[in-house]
Amino acid sequence: MSEARLIDGKAVAARLRATIATAAATLKAAHGVVPGLAAVLVGDDPASQVYVKSKTKATDDAGLKGLTHRLPATTSEAELLRLVAQLNADDAVDGILVQLPLPKQIDAQRIIEAIAPAKDVDGFHAENVGRLWSGGKALVPCTPYGCLLLACESLGKNLAGAEAVILGRSNIVGKPMAALLLGEHCTVTVAHSRTRDLPAVARRADLLVAAVGRPEMVRGDWIKPGATVIDVGINRVATPDGKGKLVGDVAFAEAQRIAGAITPVPGGVGPMTIACLLRNTLIAACRRRGLPEPAV
Ligand code: GUN
């Protein structure tokens, strides 16, 4: 069998970012609006620092305004709630993103619920979650939306009837991914650590989304020949030279021999998450002001 086609997330994300930049320039010219994204980073988790830096840079590159708030690891829940309230009230801020995970003393769910739903560009607030599941006008979580765009890149825009299996049931990826794929009329299975015979369940999938956070857990024989595989995992593993490398949740070399199409790590889902965050910020800025939403 020939090797799987690579789904180039970097290229798809670059196209989306360019479309967003054009829409942002039009919004500025027509209405004098520059959408603002406030990213909040609490503590010094190295991965979170890298993510927030890339998100803020991409925001500025697309002609939006990125603002980063860095708080020490000792920040209390009350202090963070005060900052969120200040950002909710700030008219220059259209999107608020509090990078997760948060230090132990802070209840992440309380912070998420304190963000104004109209500025919740992560799409984690209960109001947006409810709207996503009930087919309303939600701000949609960025990583699963990016996965959906990549799935459409591989399978075409019509996913109706496809057998989709999602590995992982997190609030950030697995659950919203299920809502999005149901919305596309897929038959959706959400499998997880307690699922019996995970490989057999995975093998049913025409579209397999792996979001378990375990390096290379999905082996080649978990994949139905010809399936589309979207790998959400970004795991740093040790290498003999001490430098380490990034791998996904899928054993890539094995999977590439069986799958029809597959996302690489890095360069697959990762770049899409950031592009979709910019998209949400632009959409939030338009919705808040009652302006027509750009088709991005
Ligand atoms: N940590 C890992 N993924 C995400 C994300 O999409 N948004 C936020 N805020 N934190 C994260």
Image (tube, helix red, strand yellow):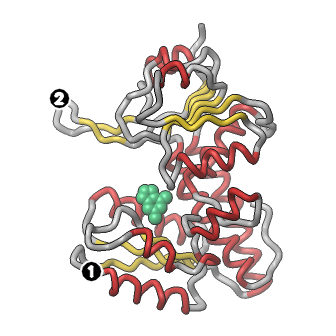
* Quadrant location of the N terminus in the rendered image: top right
On the question of residue 266 being in view, the answer is no
Which is more toward the observer, 102 or 216?
102
**Residue 65, above or below 258:** below
Q: Around disc 1, counting alpha carbons within 10 Å, would you say few (fewer than 14), some (14 to 19), or many (20 or more)?
A: some
Q: Around disc 2, counting alpha carbons within 10 Å, would you say few (fewer than 14), some (14 to 19), or many (20 or more)?
A: few
Q: Residue 21 carries which label?
A: none
On the question of residue 145 being in view, the answer is yes
Which is more toward the observer, 140 or 263?
140
User: Disc 1, ligand 1: is the CB inside 8 Å?
Assistant: no
Q: Which mark is residue 240?
A: 2
Which is more toward the observer, 270 or 232?
232
Name the residue at 49% across, 34% down.
Answer: 264
Measure how far apart labels 2 and 1 are at the Cα level: 38 Å
* Quadrant location of the C terminus in the rendered image: bottom right
Comes first in the chain, label 2 or label 1: 1
**Residue 116, above or below 23:** below
Percent x, y for residue 255? 49, 20
Name the residue at 69% across, 84% down.
Answer: 33
User: Disc 2, ligand 1: is the CB inside 8 Å?
Assistant: no
Percent x, y for residue 233? 43, 40
The disc labelled 2 sits on which kind of residue?
Answer: Pro
Residue that badge 1 annotates: 75
Percent x, y for residue 25? 71, 74
**Element marked by disc 1:** loop
The disc labelled 1 sits on which kind of residue?
Answer: Thr
> Is residue 100 found left or right of 258 in the rendered image?
left
Percent x, y for residue 77? 33, 80
**Residue 187, above or below 29:** above
